[in-house]
Amino acid sequence: MSTIYDALIGLSPSRDAELIEGYRRYAGQLAALLTPDQVETYAAYIRRTGTLPIFEDLDAEELVALTPEENVIATSIIADEQAAMENRRVVALLLQHSAPGAPAMPAPGG
C-alpha cells in the first residue's frame, strides 16, 4: 500500500475493518496533500514515536519539538480541513480499538 499505511498498521494490533478503512482514507488524503519525501518523513515520525498526534491539539512546546520537516507536515495537515478531519478520525479509531497496555494515544480534543 504505502509507507504511511504501513506505519499506521504498526500502531495497533487490531485489524478491525473500520480501523483499516480509516488508515486507507488517511493515507490517501496524505498522498494527495504531501510530497513523497514528506510522506516518508511522516511515516518515519509515526514509527519513531509510536503515536499518531492530532496536530491541531499540539501546544507550542510540542510543535517546537518537531523537526523543521515534521513541522511543515503538521502545518500542511492542519491547513487542510479534510486531512485534519481524517487525522482526528484515525486517532479516535485507534483509541477505540487499542488493546489494554498499548502505548497511549493523545485523546481527541486534547
Image (tube, grey):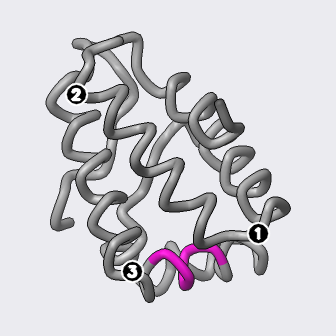
Residue position for label 3: 59
Residue 74 on the magenta segment: yes
Residue 8 image point, x, y percent: 51, 34
Q: Are marks 3 and 1 in contact (CB under 8 Å)?
A: no
Q: Name the element at disc 1.
A: loop
Quadrant assignment for the C terminus? bottom left
Residue 13 image point, x, y percent: 40, 11
Q: Along the line of sight, which residue is nearer the eye, 58 or 91?
A: 91
Residue position for label 2: 18
On the picture, is 28 further left or further right than 46?
left
Q: Amino acid at mark 3?
A: Asp
Q: Amino acid at mark 1?
A: Thr
Q: Along the line of sight, which residue is nearer the eye, 36 or 60?
A: 36
CA–CA distance between discs 3 and 1?
Answer: 25 Å
Q: What is the magenta segment's predominant secondary structure?
A: helix
Which mark, residue 4? none
Quadrant assignment for the N terminus? top right
Residue position for label 1: 35
Q: Residue at x 31, y 45 (%)?
A: 90
Placement of 27 over or under 69, stated as above or below: above
Q: Residue at x 71, y 38 (%)?
A: 3
Residue 92 image point, x, y percent: 20, 45
